[in-house]
Image (spheres, grey):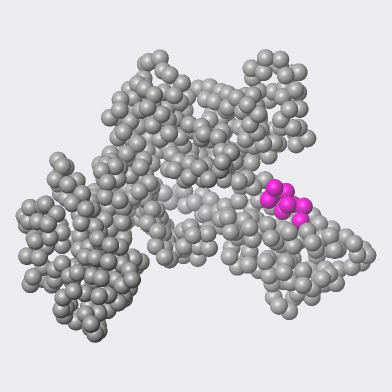
Amino acid sequence: MNHLINSLTRLSANAALSVEPKSGQLIKGKVIQLLQDNNVVVNIGRKSVEALVNQPLIKGSSYLFQVEKEEPDLVLRAVSLSEARSGPLNLASLLKQIGVQPYQHNVSFMKAIMDLNVPIHNKDLAKAFGLIQSSDNQRQAREIVLHMLSRRMPVQSSVYAALTAKYTVEFTQALSAVEHQLGGKTLSSNDEKIRTMVQTLRGEQKSHSENRVFKRFKTEAANGSKATFELFKSAGIIDAKHTLTSFKEHWSQQNPTMDRFPFTNERVAGSLQQLLQKQLPLSPSENQIIRQWVHTAKKLNSLWTQQPSNTDFSMLSRQTRTRWTETFRKIVEQKMMERITPHLQESTKQFIDQAVPLLREEGIERNPFTRNAFSSFLSDIQNLMAKQLPAKQQNLLIHSLQSLSESIPISAKDRMWLQMKTIMNEIGYNDEHVLAKLSQRTDALPQPDHTLKSLLLKGLSEGSEVKAETANRLINFINGTQLASFSDHSQTLQIALQFPGDFIGALKDVHMNMEGRKNDDGQIDSDYCHVMFYLHLSQLEETIIDLNIVERRVSVVIYNDNPEVEKLFKPYQEKLEEGLANAGYDLNSIKARVIREASRTSDSSKQKVVEEGVDVRI
């Protein structure tokens, strides 16, 4: 755990800081120029500022400053030199000012805070030491507080409790404790939802779980809500001509009590599965580029149908053709086409092959296809894009399929993917974001309880069979994961996630770390990124999977103490290549390494994997 916090602290400390000094803050700076009338230029957080000081300072020396005034001029007071010869004594004096005993471990910790080069108020310093002094494990507390300060988090007991839970609580154990307290009892509606959700998150398939989909569908229909209704129309389960009112009338004619679906669970599950398979692995900006391409294609098709039958492509508007071709070029060069192609008809794939010569400048006047072929291509890709669901509908689709997964044959891979998506959607990581957006709408209704965190919070306020200590432990874990799992810097992102290990038969939680540069959407660029999984499996025990992705080429290294592990995954290599190809990736290599050998190797990149990749997640 200490390795984790230290590594994250280093990551945050190494990021370029955008420091805007505020009155009362303590901040470390270096004097780089002496001006007239007690003015100096100070380097603070990789930014140079001019300030007025009230005592002589030495050029080239570093000081701990307190911001006394921001406007009209920045006024700084040097609290201490941060040089080694005088730092400890001055830091001890500063500790006394905030009511902390200048013991050696407190002075050392104060120096560690100053070395972060982040601004901090005296009152926050006092709170930080208060959190440490109240902890039963002060060494651990110092690491967590240092992490809070390095990430510029509020120095509050709630934040500290959340991070402590994140680094000391196993997700699997926290869920198990909640389920245990709800077992064998008559439960309230809210507690029943909590138990069902916990079972879902742990991958415990219960019989008749499809009833949850039916109950939601019937409740929404009664309330006039169209979410599930529209999802079923997108999947072709309900005829596109139906409105919600006409469908309810049709349903009641077939089944006056409306106590069951007017279609089988197998049909619902199968149709939803097909709809999920049609969802393209594209980012929002990539999705928009495809839609622009389709829009330009519609213009071209409209122009073409108005021309005589012997008109060819090269005779259409050059400007519109160029716009269509340039968008097509972008789609091909950014490897979006590789991800779209598996979802297209064979005739459309042939059309794409014929259109590729247009990407060469000299080929723009050529006529590689007929009007009928272009119309067929447009129809196919329009149908595909029409099946793309917005984020909320995708979440509902995944939730419904997870509940109905017993009604359809589903591969272990797809079941695991559904489980991971369900975990991300239903834990409550996005609750605050949703509430913030709802608060901006004057017509917004209260958000219904739909995540584990919101249900646990409701139970705390209204009463629950889940003990307050148990509920708070899990809530703190969820909050701590939100706080600690996302590091956003100017050019890069790091995301660290944790899943309960039950659904893959792991003895402990599954940890995943993903880092890479940002794409145009501000998300991790999936063409260039690094992903690591840390597992503790029942048979293979400690296992690390390291994926390095460069230009959508994937190199995989599996670390395990079993020297025979390579023989175990070799039979699955072909399936891995096929699966990656369907997602638009190529398998570059797959290798096995013994963990203990990897930790002793002199190769710096391997050493980094073990020391910063493995220990970070332990």
**Direction from residue 469 to residue 286 in the image, left or right:** right
Does residue 523 lie above or below 237 as drawn? below
Name the residue at 64% across, 19% down. Answer: 260
Q: Quadrant of residue 326?
A: bottom right
Q: How many marks are shown on the rendered structure?
A: 0
Residue 251 located within the stretch drawn in magenta: no
Name the residue at 37% across, 56% down. Answer: 487
Q: Position of residue 434 (x, y in %)?
A: 49, 43
Camera-nearest residue between 491 and 179 = 491
Q: Position of residue 450 (x, y in %)?
A: 49, 33
**Direction from residue 603 to residue 457 in the image, left or right:** right
The answer to whether residue 198 shows anywhere in this view is no
Name the residue at 60% across, 59% down. Answer: 286
**Direction from residue 341 to residue 119 in the image, left or right:** left
Camera-nearest residue between 355 and 334 = 334
Does residue 394 lie above or below 306 as drawn? above
Q: Position of residue 392 (x, y in %)?
A: 57, 42
Camera-nearest residue between 369 and 281 = 281
Magenta segment? 378-386
Camera-nearest residue between 476 and 182 = 476
